[in-house]
Amino acid sequence: MSETKLTEKEKFAQLRKVFEPYFNSIGETDAVFVAKMQYPFSAPGNDKKEQVISFWERDFLKSGYQNGKDFYIEIVDGNNNRLSNELVLYRYPHNPRWNDESEGLEKAIYGGYTKYILPVYELQEVYRGIEGEPLVTKEAPRTTQSQLDIFGEDGNLDAHLTEFTMRDLISVIYRKPMSSKIWLNSLINNLNEGVEI
């Protein structure tokens, strides 16, 4: 007996279904979930290639992302198949300036349509596990300033400038929590949510 070939819509529904317990656990049953293939890309004038995923403009306009929703992303192969039996879910937090040329994503034009390029390192891993096993989330809880003072990475929130990286600087300038320093990401999240510090 031959296997039935799934349509793209059915395959996508199966990919999403596995993460339903996670979406339910965070209270986002209508989460914006997308499956994307990663590929090497270098911006014009830059020889360094980095792994990226891309979105068409309609992905932002029709998904709810532009209205404040985050993207939840699984990286798949070119046929929308899982890369392995390990499940990894990423989040790309809502960026109200995604379409602003000075602050948004890298743009490329393909066949007259705008494509937005997003480096994989900007994604936040929020879930990792094996299908059917208990849920394990990777998302750090939001913290208050007093907690940050106590629980900084080295016990001191006042980091030395010699420990500050370009990625940390970009995180601060654009108020995007993409630093490798958990305390800095938490501080940026709090600022973005209007929490007084």
Image (cartoon, rainbow, N blue to C red):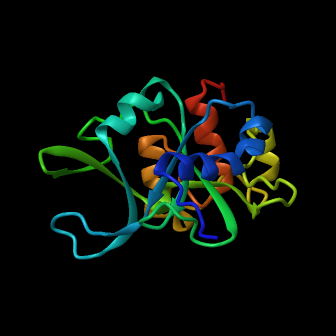
Tell me the quadrant of the picture where the C terminus can be found: top right
Kindly give the residue lying farthest to the front in the view shown: 1
Question: What's the residue at 49%, 62% (across, down)?
Answer: 121
Question: What's the residue at 66%, 26% (across, down)?
Answer: 195
Residue 58 at x, y = what percent?
A: 32, 35
Residue 2 at x, y = what percent?
A: 59, 69
Residue 45 horizontal side relative to residue 38, left or right: left
Foreground pick, 114 / 47? 114
Question: What's the residue at 77%, 36% (across, down)?
Answer: 24
Residue 45 at x, y = what percent?
A: 15, 68
- Note whether 17 is above or below 192 in the view shown: below
Foreground pick, 107 / 179? 107
Residue 164 horizontal side relative to residue 86, left or right: left
- Note whether 105 is above or below 163 in the view shown: above
Asked whether residue 172 is in view, the answer is yes
Question: What's the residue at 26%, 68% (across, down)?
Answer: 42
Residue 49 at x, y = what percent?
A: 31, 74
Q: Quadrant of residue 31?
A: top right
Foreground pick, 164 / 84? 84
Asked whether residue 98 is in view, the answer is no
Tell me the quadrant of the picture where the N terminus can be found: bottom right
